[in-house]
Amino acid sequence: MELGYVYNIHTSQRTWGGAISYSQERLAGFSDVVIFFAINAETGERINLHNLRLEPLNEISGLMMETMPVDELLEIFPEPDEAEIASMKEVVREIANRHLQSSEIVTLEYGFWTEDGTPDTTYHPSQNSPFFIIDTDGRVVEIIIQRETHLLVMINTPFLE
């Protein structure tokens, strides 16, 4: 495990960031895993958590996905139907409730939260599914889960200064 203080001149929020890695021997059935996290240095609130598997799922790497034609990607990762999205939303709701601690979910939607503060629900073929949450404090929380296993890939509370 590594831990360090993160200073970002673009925000007043100061954070501690860290990385934890596990080898295949320690985590039976999984490839090497690295988990990155950041917490608010003043409040101790978790800002983000990224769970990165070092080997691609379904034998498709990120680089391969960037170069594959969209029609091929759609064959491998078809757009989820309403039932699949509803199932994933329940998992995301559980994750969000553990993450939020002091607030509650107001909005939970399938899709990305864009930098200009608007949702993007356009489907992008992937093995991961994005969701965003707005809580009672007005914070946006981005959550990405692995579509097939529903494992948490990323949770992020972006800086909105």
Image (cartoon, rainbow, N blue to C red):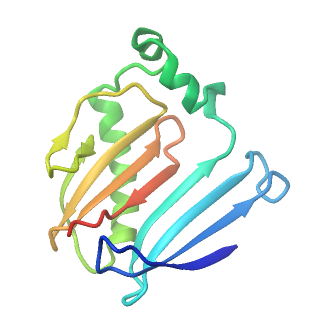
Task: Tell me: residue 137, above or below residue 152.
Answer: below
Q: Is residue 59 left or right of residue 110?
A: right
Residue sitting at 35 percent across and 43 percent down? 130
Quadrant into which the N terminus falls = bottom right
Q: Is residue 69 left or right of residue 131?
A: right
Towards the viewer: 16 or 146: 16
Residue sitting at 29 percent across and 80 percent down? 12
Towards the viewer: 45 or 103: 45
Q: Percent from the top left, x then y, of residue 46?
A: 42, 74
The answer to which image quadrant residue 88 occupies is: top left
Quadrant into which the C terminus falls = bottom left
Q: Percent from the top left, x then y, of residue 98?
A: 39, 70
Residue sitting at 57 percent across and 23 percent down? 64
Towards the viewer: 99 or 117: 117
Q: Is residue 75 left or right of residue 89?
A: right
Counting the numbered discs, the total is 0
The answer to which image quadrant residue 27 occupies is: bottom right
